[in-house]
């Protein structure tokens, strides 16, 4: 049994939907369990329309609902051959879109848009998408059944990014879904969405369909969990940045998690968790090249030769430095910094403190930097006035570069080789951090220089 997750681009237009249908059809003997996302762009459109509704921009709401309707009805009208099935899908789609329009009306009337309402609204993307995929697969003679994940996946009330209750969820999947699979049914399950124990719709966080795929695969004890995407697998670096970037045949769960935290947009970081627990391999596969093996993510790191597996980078960041003699040996300064950031919901991506304790610096998304800075100035106003802290400074337009590889642990000279390569490429290092897991070395450079740095490291470790 193989769980297969198809993302938004894979189900995002007529051609791609037909490709997906052929792929699923060809794997029927392996007993596939399908999980799919909303059509690409739809989740964003749904959420953006909610904001228009909140601002009572009825014109914009109407326009977006029309475009949503057109997008989905077009799939039904163009792809479905069976007349009865076509009629049924059109009816379902129309009813769902009317419901959605009512939700937007509610938001407008109340002038209130909670994260709970946003989840309810966002859920329509996956429902519309999976209903049409299921109908299409029936046309391809696949014995499918549409499954709303809300009947299976139970979460807490943390709307927008809810936490899964695995006891209830696994039990539901084993008692409600497994018997269907055993009967030879191919379920088509909505990614991303779930419910609370009192039946309120939640979501698992943006791009959460990968996570759904892995939750389902783990609960079913699948042989493998496949994440279908539009590249051949996890690469040594972003091929748009680096000449000679190539696909990694095998990486470990830990490497995959580390890479996804540092910007390799291949897989949602949480996806690894359920798979690790059951020791089920995850495979990244390309819908454009379905016979290619892809990248296998499992317990072992594989033997690709180099200890460094991959170099990733994240752009559009700011580095904030807090400096002052008054910080030395004073407990609680870091706690105050990070509590301030947590209060305003700013995610810290990297931290570095020299052992002199004279300077603490950390990296945040540039879009959040102003908010972070305002809160920090408030928190430290007295310290700043008394010159305990000299200044809080910001440098925008920086990037984090991370090199990842399980074999780096205990191998000497990796950092030396990396930084020599960066220096030889004439790139200045703004800050450095290495986690004690030794799985990752990350550093900050000016965004304008990031390509040069990544290429230099890729070359020095012969990743091509
Ligand atoms: N449709 C959701 C999103 O765009 C979930 C997903 O695509 O995985 O975030
Ligand atoms: Mg997506």
Image: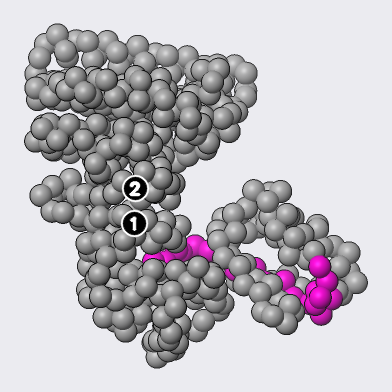
Q: Is residue 31 left or right of residue 5?
A: left
Q: Is residue 293 left or right of residue 270?
A: left
Considering only order in the chain, which callout, 1 or 2, is on the residue closer to the N terminus? 2
Q: Position of residue 447 (x, y in %)?
A: 46, 71
**From which residue to which does the magenta span run?**
312-331
Q: Position of residue 369 (x, y in %)?
A: 62, 59
Looking at the rendered image, the quarter that the N terminus falls into is top left
Which residue corresponds to the image point at 48% horizontal and 72% vertical from the top-left?
438
Number of other residues with Cα within 10 Å of mark 1, as a class: few under 14, some 14 to 19, many 20 or more: some
Whole-angstrom CA distance, mark 2 to mark 1, is 7 Å
Q: Is residue 371 left or right of residue 159?
A: right
Q: Is residue 243 magenta?
A: no
Q: In the image, is the residue at mark 2 within 8 Å of ligand 1 by its beta carbon?
A: no
Nearer to us in this view, 456 or 404: 404
- Which residue is identified by label 2? 279
Up/down of 93 relative to 248, above or below:
above
Q: Position of residue 27 (x, y in %)?
A: 12, 36
What is the secondary structure assignment of the residue under circle 1?
A: loop
Nearer to us in this view, 178 or 12: 178
Which residue corresponds to the image point at 10% horizontal and 32% vertical from the top-left?
29
- Which residue is identified by label 1? 299
Q: Position of residue 408 (x, y in %)?
A: 40, 75
Nearer to us in this view, 25 or 240: 25
Q: Is residue 314 visible?
A: yes
Which residue corresponds to the image point at 45% horizontal and 57% vertical from the top-left?
261
Looking at the rendered image, the quarter that the C terminus falls into is bottom left
Secondary structure mostly taken by the magenta-highlighted segment of the chain: strand
């Amino acid at each position: 049994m193989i769980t297969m997750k198809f993302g938004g681009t894979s189900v995002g237009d007529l051609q791609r939907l037909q490709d997906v249908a052929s792929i699923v059809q060809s794997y029927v003997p392996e007993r596939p369990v399908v999980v799919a996302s909303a059509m690409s762009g739809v989740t964003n459109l749904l959420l953006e329309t909610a904001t228009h509704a909140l601002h009572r921009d009825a014109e914009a709401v109407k326009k977006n609902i029309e475009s949503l309707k057109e997008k989905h009805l077009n799939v039904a009208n163009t792809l479905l051959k069976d007349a009865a099935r076509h009629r049924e899908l059109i009816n379902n789609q129309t009813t769902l879109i009317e419901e959605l329009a009512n939700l937007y009306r509610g938001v407008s009337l109340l002038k209130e848009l909670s994260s709970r309402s946003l989840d309810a609204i966002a859920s329509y993307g996956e429902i519309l998408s999976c209903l049409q995929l299921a109908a299409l697969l029936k046309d391809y003679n696949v014995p499918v059944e549409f499954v709303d994940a809300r009947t299976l996946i139970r979460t807490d009330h943390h709307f927008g990014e809810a936490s899964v209750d695995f006891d209830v969820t696994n039990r539901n999947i084993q008692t409600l879904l497994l018997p269907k699979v055993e009967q030879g049914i191919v379920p088509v399950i909505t990614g991303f969405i779930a419910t609370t124990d009192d039946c309120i719709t939640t979501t698992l966080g943006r791009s959460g369909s990968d996570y759904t795929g892995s939750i389902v695969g783990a609960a079913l004890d699948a042989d493998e969990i496949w994440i279908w995407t539009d590249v051949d697998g996890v690469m040594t670096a972003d091929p748009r940045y680096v000449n000679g970037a190539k696909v990694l045949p095998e990486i470990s769960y830990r490497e995959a998690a580390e890479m996804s935290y540092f910007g390799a947009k291949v897989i949602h970081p949480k996806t690894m968790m359920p798979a690790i627990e059951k020791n089920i391999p995850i495979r990244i596969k390309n819908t454009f090249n379905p016979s290619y093996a892809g990248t296998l993510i499992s317990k072992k790191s594989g033997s690709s030769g180099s200890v460094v597996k991959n170099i990733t980078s994240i752009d559009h960041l700011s580095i904030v430095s807090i400096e002052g003699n008054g910080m030395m040996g004073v407990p609680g300064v870091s706690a105050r910094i990070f509590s301030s950031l947590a209060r305003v919901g700013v995610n810290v991506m990297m931290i570095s403190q020299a052992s002199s304790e004279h300077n603490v610096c950390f990296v945040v998304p540039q879009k959040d930097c102003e908010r972070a800075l305002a809160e920090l100035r408030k928190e430290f106003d007295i310290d700043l006035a008394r010159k305990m802290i000299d200044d809080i400074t910001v440098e925008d337009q920086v990037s984090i570069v991370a090199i990842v590889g399980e074999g780096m642990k205990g191998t000497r000279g990796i950092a030396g080789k990396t930084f020599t390569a960066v220096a030889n490429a004439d790139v200045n290092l703004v800050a450095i951090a290495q986690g004690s897991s030794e799985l990752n070395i990350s550093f900050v450079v000016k965004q304008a220089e990031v390509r040069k740095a990544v290429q230099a490291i890729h070359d020095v470790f012969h990743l091509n």
